[in-house]
Image (cartoon, rainbow, N blue to C red):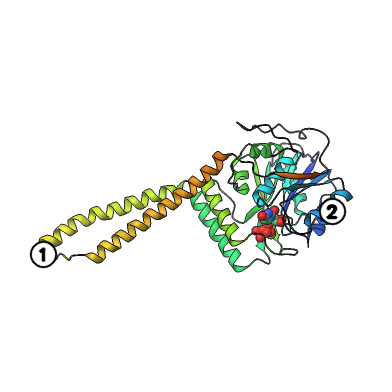
């Protein structure tokens, strides 16, 4: 691919968010550690405020294997925030992110590393097939990717999830993006660098149910589009221009009808016009509201997540081979503090 000599990771970090996954946590840790046993690695598991036995099982895994790190968040902050927490705490020179439910096969990380060693900075996994997903999930996902492709300014491969591997340079670039509304798979494309794909078959969940409710999915897709596109805001302008255009055309028509005396006192048409315009205005206001709400979230500058506790924190200060991310205007972050 390039003239970069083949390289191996000094330290591989694998980051996985975990939320109420007591049925599969142990299996995940076993399979992931086996899949990357050839490398010097750390497995960074972020407990996103689980309320079942997950925290206990994670602590036990950390006790049994010092390479397993656990970061307990103080409550459920959501998948993207939990992933961000893991990425910020990872110290490796190569970092992979993966779902903990074994829908993404951890063995694929080896293929991703092979691509990285050939010079790729970002390797994303594209799902060839998705097993065990409901027709509803598949349909909404496909609509979403089509809409996102039309509206957004980044070219996101359809059917690529958050299962990705990043070189430290790309990760540091990603971590300088401090926005609250996070759509990590779009953000990893946005940072650029040398991007490449590997394809895989997405398995069914190993156990348990999806933690993405319809509400969370809707919010997530709105976040995605609002983070990468202004088109919805501009839609209001186009709708306004269209209805004003129709009004201008209607003026001579009304005059002509008046002259030729077939003018109808149009209660119905006026009502329709009012309802139509009122509807368009309300939709436009709603769209603006979505953006204003996100602007409000940004200016509050709240932390994305709060760490309650940590297991197996690396003793060596600083990131391995890392340039500290530039965080304009933000206080320096340390792992044990609010982050
Ligand atoms: N997850 C999380 N916090 C949440 C929701 C999900 O950390 O609020 C984790 C979950 O444990 C899993 C991953 O994110 O490891 C993906 O979630 P899920 O499998 O439920 O999503 P789906 O694959 O159905 O899109
Ligand atoms: Mg899943």
Visible in this render: residue 210?
Answer: yes
* Most foreground residue, 145 or 129: 145
SS for tag 2? helix
Whereabouts is ligand 2, in terms of quadrant? Answer: bottom right
* Most foreground residue, 78 or 101: 78
Q: Is residue 262 above or below residue 162?
A: below
Q: Residue visible at 32% across and 53% down?
A: 242
Ligand 1 contact, mark 1 (Cβ < 8 Å): no
* Most foreground residue, 242 or 48: 48
Check residue 34 in the rendering and tell me which mark sits there, or answer none.
2
Instruction: Describe residue 145's horizontal placement relative to residue 101 as left or right.
Output: left
Count of picture labels = 2
Neighbours of disc 2 within 10 Å: few (<14), some (14-19), many (20+): few
Marks 1 and 2, how far apart in space?
86 Å
Visible in this render: residue 229?
Answer: no
Check residue 68 in the rendering and tell me which mark sits there, or answer none.
none
SS for tag 1? loop
Residue 202 is situated, as x and y percent measured from the top left of the image, at 69, 60
Instruction: Nearest to the eye among marks 1 and 2: give it.
Output: 1
Check residue 261 in the rendering and tell me which mark sits there, or answer none.
1
Neighbours of disc 1 within 10 Å: few (<14), some (14-19), many (20+): few
């Amino acid at each position: 691919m390039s003239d970069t000599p083949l390289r191996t990771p000094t330290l591989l970090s694998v980051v996985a968010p975990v939320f109420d996954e007591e049925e599969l946590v142990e299996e995940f840790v076993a399979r992931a550690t086996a899949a990357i046993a050839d490398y010097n690695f750390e497995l960074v598991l972020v407990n996103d405020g689980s309320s079942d036995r997950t925290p206990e099982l994670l602590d036990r895994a950390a006790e049994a294997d010092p390479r397993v790190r656990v970061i307990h968040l103080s409550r459920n902050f959501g998948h993207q925030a939990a992933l961000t927490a893991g990425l910020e705490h990872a110290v490796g020179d190569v970092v992979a992110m993966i779902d903990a439910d074994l829908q993404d096969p951890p063995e694929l990380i080896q293929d991703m590393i092979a691509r990285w060693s050939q010079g790729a900075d970002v390797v994303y996994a594209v799902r060839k097939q998705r097993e065990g997903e409901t027709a509803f999930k598949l349909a909404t996902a496909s609509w979403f990717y089509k809409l996102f492709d039309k509206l957004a300014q980044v070219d996101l491969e359809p059917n690529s999830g958050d299962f990705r591997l990043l070189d430290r340079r790309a990760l540091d670039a990603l971590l300088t993006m401090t926005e609250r509304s996070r759509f990590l798979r779009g953000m990893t494309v946005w940072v650029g660098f040398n991007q490449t794909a590997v394809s895989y078959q997405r398995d069914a969940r190993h156990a348990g149910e999806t933690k993405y409710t319809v509400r969370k999915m809707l919010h997530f897709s709105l976040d995605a589009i609002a983070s990468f596109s202004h088109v919805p805001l501009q839609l209001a302008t186009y709708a306004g221009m269209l209805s004003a255009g129709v009004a201008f055309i209607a003026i001579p028509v009304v005059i002509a009808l008046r002259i030729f005396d077939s003018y109808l006192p149009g209660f119905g048409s006026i009502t329709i016009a009012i309802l139509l315009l009122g509807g368009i205005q309300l939709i436009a206001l709603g769209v603006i509201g979505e953006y204003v709400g996100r602007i409000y979230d940004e200016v509050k500058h709240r932390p994305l997540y709060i760490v309650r506790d940590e297991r197996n924190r690396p003793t060596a200060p600083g990131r391995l081979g890392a340039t500290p991310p530039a965080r304009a205007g933000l206080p320096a972050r340390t792992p044990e503090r609010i982050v």
